[in-house]
Image: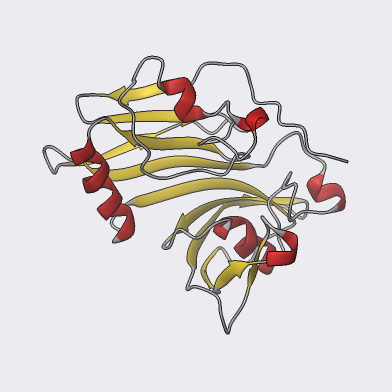
Amino acid sequence: MDFAYTPPPDAPRILHHDHEILVVDKQAGLLSVPGRTEDRADCLIARLRGAFPQVLLVHRLDQDTSGIMVFALTPHAQRHLGQQFEKRQVRKIYVARLHGRLEPKSGTVDLPLIVDWPNRPRQMVDHENGKPAQTDWRVIRADDAETRVRLMPVTGRSHQLRVHMLALGHPILGDPLYAQGKAAAHPRLMLHAQSLRIRHPDSGVSQTFTAPVPF
């Protein structure tokens, strides 16, 4: 069955904006940028251009992931923020609900990732050709059915958190690509970008922005 893109109708929730940056809480189900086909033109950055015509992309979240995104409002801010992401100076914290009980209480996944070409957009672990990818985790609470966990990606590979949790044997609930059976039977991907710490492109002062977890 063909996938039908039906983004949520609500307007983006603006958390902060000033002369250099715009911080938004992205809804699950909305693309960050336009897709390749005309029916996927509706996206977060397109919706933001109505009020902020100068908005510039810095990073992305998966369509199914909700939470914090920062955009630039000047070319200087885009360069400055882009370098922070490239040099891994940005602190990102996600909250996820996983299938089953994740043990121990904290740890690190260090598994290289590469696109699974025959099954795009899926990614996979590849120890020979994959790019380095590290994710720290800390359990918030758990029972035998599921685990609520805080995820801190060190790198920023495509689908990194989703594939790393799958590799641990605990896929993220509601994941349409990597979860199966009961784990997939949720109304949305249970992954949310809760907080983002950056240095402001103008002042250089460290700032942390947060978006409440909707699940």
Q: Nearer the viewer, residue 211 or 32?
A: 32
Is 103 situated above or below 29? below
Q: Residue at x 67, y 68 (%)?
A: 167
Q: Nearer the viewer, residue 207 or 140?
A: 207
Q: Percent position (x, y) of residue 102?
A: 66, 61
Q: Percent position (x, y) of residue 132?
A: 47, 73
Q: Going by the image, does 155 lie left or right of 162? A: left
Q: Is residue 168 visible?
A: no
Is 145 situated above or below 57? below
Q: Residue at x 68, y 58 (%)?
A: 122
Q: Quadrant of the N terminus?
A: top right
Q: Residue at x 56, y 29 (%)?
A: 27
Q: Is residue 54 visible?
A: yes
Is 12 situated above or below 34? above
Q: How is the image coloured?
A: secondary structure
Q: Going by the image, does 149 lie left or right of 83? A: right
Q: Percent position (x, y) of residue 211?
A: 45, 32
Is 6 situated above or below 108? above
Q: Residue at x 49, y 69 (%)?
A: 133
